[in-house]
Image: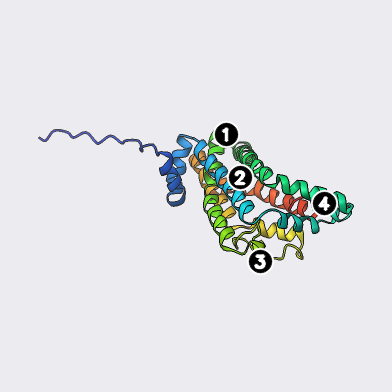
Amino acid sequence: MSPDVAPPLETEPKPMNEFSRILGIFFEPQKTFADIAERPRWLVPLLLVILSGIAYIYAFGAHVGWAAYLHRLLDNNPSMQRIPAEQRQRIFDMQVRFASVGGVVNVAIGTVLMFLVGGGIAMGIIKGLLGVPIRFKQAFCVFCYAALPLLIYRALSIAVVFLKNPEDVDPINPFMSNFGALMDPDKSSKFLSSFATSLDLFSLWVLLLAATGLKAAGGKRLSFGGALFAVALPWAVWVLLRGALSSLGMMG
């Protein structure tokens, strides 16, 4: 008789390094998010997203400049038109002076807050409404990695800044990745323009990746539809709120 052969032991998947994770987000998101859920790390993707935003702000300020863009915002803001000309000019000069610094601070702090709030709300929906256990660190890491398509968006935006006529560059819509790029921001409804801009190819990509990541963190008890609901609901609320603020002239 032949000796019994012991079945081969199943080995755990080898942990992915950061470079493999970054590539995996684009080519193998399900496998990559499974590794992220098991070993949540957030520093590298968070820094990449922030630095890409700062690079775009620097490129726009250096090659195009903020004066023309801010002039357009102020000239089309009804509340600003009611301010005396001298005071309006002082506001304009101050905004031009601090535009680049303010943009950098907004990207750095705003990105962190967006991921913290987004991760917290998604975790609350998944745990509170859907009854699936998930840790905050997992949700936060998912949002950090899901935002990596913004690296492609900002790289293309920087290219447009240097290739396009500076007078035609819109920092909000540098190229046509959403329906808002087809609308005249000066003549269209502020609400509709903001809403159309939010329907961006890269934003939808990020939403789908975030849902994939949350599904991996929630395991078999969480469906992809439930994970998508956890990110789509707060996103939809933000889109409507942003549109309302834009129609009131409180947001560009």
Residue drawn at x 80%, y 58% is 75
* Structural crowding at the residue carrying mark 1, measured as other residues with C-alpha within 10 Å and reported as few (<14), some (14–19) or many (≥20): some
Relative to residue 204, is residue 145 depicted above or below?
above
Q: Are marks 2 and 1 in contact (CB under 8 Å)?
A: no
Cα separation between marks 1 and 3: 38 Å
Residue 168 badge: none
Residue 89 badge: 4
Q: Which residue is mark 1?
A: 136
Q: Are marks 3 and 4 in contact (CB under 8 Å)?
A: no
* Structural crowding at the residue carrying mark 4, measured as other residues with C-alpha within 10 Å and reported as few (<14), some (14–19) or many (≥20): some
- Front-most of residues 204 and 148: 148
Under mark 3, the amino acid is Leu
- Foreground label between 2 and 4: 4
Q: Which residue is mark 3?
A: 182
157 horizontally vs 88: left or right: left
Under mark 1, the amino acid is Phe
Can I make out residue 226 in this image? Answer: no
Q: Which residue is mark 2?
A: 230
The location of residue 164, given as percent across then percent down, is 59, 63
Query: Which type of secondary structure does the marked residue at label 4 adopt?
Result: helix
Query: Which type of secondary structure does the marked residue at label 2 adopt?
Result: helix
- Front-most of residues 227 and 204: 204
Relative to residue 15, is residue 206 depicted above or below?
below
Cα separation between marks 4 and 1: 46 Å
